[in-house]
Structure formats: structure tokens, C-alpha cells
Image: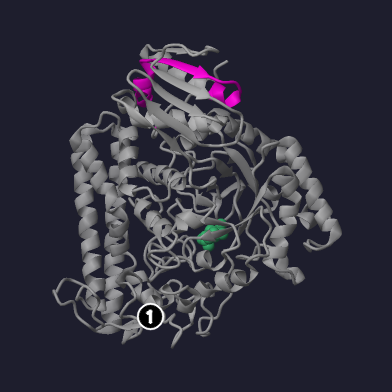
Amino acid sequence: MPLPVPALPEGVDPAWLPDEVFRPLGTRRVLVRGPGPLVATVHGEVAAACARFGGRVERAAAPEPCDLLLELTGDDDSEAFTFGRDADRTTVTASGPTGLLYGLFHVVRLGERAFAGEHRLTEHRPRLGIRMLDHWDNVAVHPVMGQVERGYAGGSLFWAAGRAREEWGRVRAYARLLAACGINAVAVNNVNVHATEARLLTDRIGEVAALAEAFRPYGIRTHLSVTFAAPMVLGGLPTADPLDEDVRAWWAAATGRVYAAIPDFGGYVVKADSEGQPGPFAYGRSHAEGANMLAAALAPHGGTVHWRAFVYDHRQDWRDRTTDRARAAHEQFAPLDGEFADNVLLQVKHGPMDFQVREPLSPVIGALPRTRLAVEVQATQEYTGQQRHVCWLGPMWSEALRFGHEGPDGPTVGERASALVAVANVGDDPFWTGHPLAQANLYTFGRLAWQPDADPGQLLDEWLALTFPGASAQLADGVRRVLAGSWRTYEKYTAPLGVGFMVQPGHHYGPSVDGYEYSPWGTYHFADRDGVGVDRSAATGTGYAAQYAKPWAEIYESPSTCPDELLLFFHHMPYGHVLHDGRTVIQHIYDTHFEGVEEVATARALWASLAPLLDRPRHTRVAERYDEQLRSAREWRDQVNTYFLRTSGVPDARGRRIY
Ligand code: GCV
């Protein structure tokens, strides 16, 4: 029986799966062969397309003439598929059912091209086995963080006011969108695990099981964030010491019950000894001992621990120049290489800080060759405009994934990692992502996780073709232009040369140059009358640069070889220092802030010109957000430029207005 395609709730945007993209396969004769529930999903997709566009779907046991054959040839857990076409038939085969599903969406992406000419038989296999979204969703509304921590797209899709939301149709529609861009894992609750959320592991596991049921038909495994203190807060034990036998037995039993409810459960996500969350340090144990205890509980069931490496001192004294937040994760984790169990993934943010608009690659990624790694990026735009600003992050993620951590010619991060994880950017907003153009971030993330060396520009075009099927050249070109350079534009009007955290504390939206300069969370620019930036060299600074392998340690060590875009991340430089492009640091600050605002104004006007070509709700939503983006960009420009004019006393060489 075909599994019916989930109907979108009234008014909810189809994102990159509007009906129209199924027309090429929906007008043809399609044969779907193979048993099992995921083949029923494929069958349902094809049946819906054929019902809409007049084609025919068949489920014959023997091969028959057809335009498209979708065939499951085995029963393994491979996600790969082959695609090819001879003179008159397009064929997709897979030895595992999820592979067939991905093959179907490959055909959808190709559209008419899938049925034209001949295509050499090619195999398609995801580079990364886990392609995951972490939802920072709270079950109960948190008094400060709300329903979704760092969420800019409305409420949670999964939870509302303390319980499961039970809009299963919408969750299934979400699962379908995720599968169409290759995502195969979802963590359904916040890594900051509060009291209500903790119980999802035990007496409330049924709510998680119901979510897993909605995700399963689209090949997505469900994961849960758990608190390290669970044996105490849920089990009544006096300790959560990972080497205590009772604690280990408690986790083993709790995990057994999770698998009884969710046989294909993916595993746990753990934020331990980080920003106030409990962890193994309280018992004098290492992160490896903590992670391995959970790994032992999960191993008999085939589950994985995502153990986060986001560990640093958030109670620093700004007077203490020796503490450097950037160094912290490497100091904690590099010595533990080789100690983690095979089913532990060390989940590392791509930069050493916290998803700033520009950071170097985290040195942790190169420092643990015997440890499996998950690289974490942030689709939710906490520090990149909070889905009020257009900021397409594809180029930033691609740079990180293509980075050769042993040197420009060595293996890339995409080759080194076992998983790619994004903090999700969706909510119950009708456009899913608040800003309609932020859908491009979610789509690009999924596709990069499948193929980390993909050209992000091509992925943007792919997203465009699906989201706006049949778009005129003017529309496609306009949308591409407003998105393509938007990350660099955002960088220009916010953070110069690798300086981060000049944001308003707490909510992190809008400028505050000294917002974090004297706070316990770390110090980020050290601007004075002579210069700006953090000296992280080994020779005179915090020594952070030496955490990299050569050649990066040497390249970052010296201002003469450090790339300009990271100069102030690694060095405290005089305002008059001349950059590789011939401008001084201070002139770069002024120029980029003026340029950034101009680029936003240009993009806003371009968007306005697309009004006749777009549906009104989408156009209006984006146009309103552009008004706010322009206002905010001006605020950034004026605060940053004024701050540095007053601090340095150096006037703008071009005599523009600074306050
Ligand atoms: C979930 C940053 C965010 C926090 C987030 C944390 C993390 O500090 O501001 O909201 O907490 O990262 O990644 O754990």
C-alpha cells in the first residue's frame, strides 16, 4: 500500500517541494519495485504525483516497460543509490530502502533532465553517515529562552506549553522536506535540558516515540538530548558518577526502555560541564569517562552518543589576560584522543568560539585523529541576523568543510568528519524559517552534509529551481543575487577582520561594541587608543595559534601571513597597520561598514523590483524584513564606526559622516 503523502496544513509553505516539482515524474509511467515501509513512502510519493499530473504508477513483481523504474534490490542499511538512463528508461536502484528514497528525490531535483537523453550509470552515496538537525526546543516555555532557545521562527513544531504538540501531519511534512535534502537524524529537544525535558528520557518517552513514528517513513532517526544528572534527578540516586556501578546500571536500564519504545532510536546528545550543565567534572572524571558510560548503555542497541565539545569557562574575570575562551575545548579534549568509545561522536562547533560571522576552524577538529567527529554548525541565525537579516551561510559552511586542517593540500574537514550537525532554524512559522529566504540555509546544510565538497553556488541554484519552479530568468537571477553575497555583506556591516561578540548581551541581536568586553563570558576585542584585536600568538599572546598543526600554526602566528579576514582574531594590531589589500585596519573598518549598508540597500531595492514576480505573502514578508535589516545595518555601521573613531582618533580618509 502506498503511504499517503503528508498534507501541508492550510497556509504552510511547501518550501522546496511544491507540487510542480513532481510534474516530470507525475506525467510518466513509473514502476516501483520492492517490499517494506520506505518503499511504501516512495510509492506514495509517486502515486500522489501521478494522480495530480496524469501518469501511472505500478507495483509489478516482474520488470515491465516503464519510463522510470525505482527498484529496491536488497535489504541493507546503505543510503546509496544508482541512477542511470538508457534510450527510453530512467532507472534508480538501491540495496537499502533509504537509498531508494534518496534516489527518488534525486529524480525530483533533476526534473525533466532525468528523462532526457542518456545518463551514464552513476552511484550516489552520502559522504557523511549522520546528517543531523539539533532542535534547541524546550517542551515547557522557558522564562528567558522561550519555547525554542535561539529560535527565530515561532514556536516549536514538536512541543507546546509543556507537552507534545501532536500536529503529526506537520511533523511528517517536515520530515519529508528534510529527507528531500538528505537529512537523516533529528534531536528533538534542547541541549540545555531543564526539568520537564529531562523526563522525556523516562516516563515521557512515549511522546518521543510518537515523534519518531512521524519521522521514520522518511528515513529519519530520532535522538534525544539528555542531562548527565539524570540518574539523580530522575532515578533518585545520590550520584551521577560515570564509574559508579549503580549509575551505569541505571543508564543501561533507562536506555533499554528507550529502545523498547523506539527500536531505531539514534542516541543521546549531551552538553556536559558547559554553561552550567552537569557533567563528569563534579566527580573528578574526564569527558571520555562520561561519554563512554553513555556509549556503553547505547552500544547493545546500535545507538550513538553525540558528546559536545563546547566546554569553556563562562565565569571568567576580564582582568585576567591569560584565560582565552578560544583555547578551552582543545585543552580539554585533545589529551583524550584515543580514549573515546567507537560509538561516541565528539560534536565540535566549527569554530573555537560560538558561531560568529567569522571564525577560524576549531583546532579541535585536527587534534583528535583517533576520535570520531561530528562538526556542528548553526542554521538558526543567532549571531547572523536572527532570521530578520538575509544571511545565506552556504559559503561559510563550505569554507569550513573544505578547509585542510593539516594544510591547504591535506585532507579536508568534510573528509575527516563522520557527521555534520546543524542547530535547526525552523519553527511553527508558515514559512518554517521566519525569514522565507532562510529556507535556503536549511536546504544547503542538508545537501552539504551529503556532499561536503559540493559547490555551494550550485546548491543555491538547486534550491532556487525547486522553490521557484519555472521562475523567469529575472526572478531566479534576483533571488540568487540577494542571497549569494549576503554572508559577506553581513560580515561587512557587523564584525571586522574576525572580531566577534560585539552584540547586545543576552539576546545577541544588534550592536554593542563593548557588550561582552567586561563580562564573565570572555573578552573579544581589547580596543584601545592604539589598536584592536586579541593577541593569540604563541610568542606574545595566549598561545592559541599554537594549537593548530603546521602550517596553520605558523601562518596564524604572524600578522604578515595571517589572512586579513582573521587578523584581529589572532592579533592585536595598530589602527595604522596596512592590510594585504593596501588599506589600514581603521580604514577597513570604516569602509566595510559603509559598503555593507550600501549592499543591504541595493539588495532591498532589488527585492522590491521582484514584487510582480512573486506571491504576495512571501514578497511582503521579505520586504518587511529588509526594512528592519537596513535599519539595523545602519545602527551597526554608526555604532561601530563611531566607537572606533572616538577610540582611535583617526578620521575617515574619505570624510564620510561618523558621529
Ligand atoms: C543551547 C550559545 C548559545 C546558547 C546555547 C549554547 C550551546 O552559548 O547562546 O543559547 O545553548 O551556545 O551551543 O550550547
Q: Nearer the viewer, residue 144 or 66?
A: 66
Left of 201 or right of it: where is 507?
left
- x, y percentage for residue 91? 42, 24
- x, y percentage for residue 153? 45, 44
Q: Nearer the viewer, residue 655 or 421?
A: 421
Per the rendered image, the range of residues in magenta is: 17-41
Q: Give the SS element for disc 1.
A: loop
- Disc 1 residue type (three-letter): His
The image quadrant that residue 528 belongs to is bottom left
In this view, 417 is above or below 550? above
Residue occupied by mark 1: 571
Quadrant in which ligand 1 is drawn? bottom right
Q: Residue at x 14, y 75 (%)?
A: 655
Q: Residue furthest left?
A: 654
**Quadrant in which the C terminus appears:** bottom left
Q: Residue at x 67, y 40 (%)?
A: 265
Q: Residue at x 83, y 62 (%)?
A: 244
Q: Residue at x 28, y 64 (%)?
A: 492
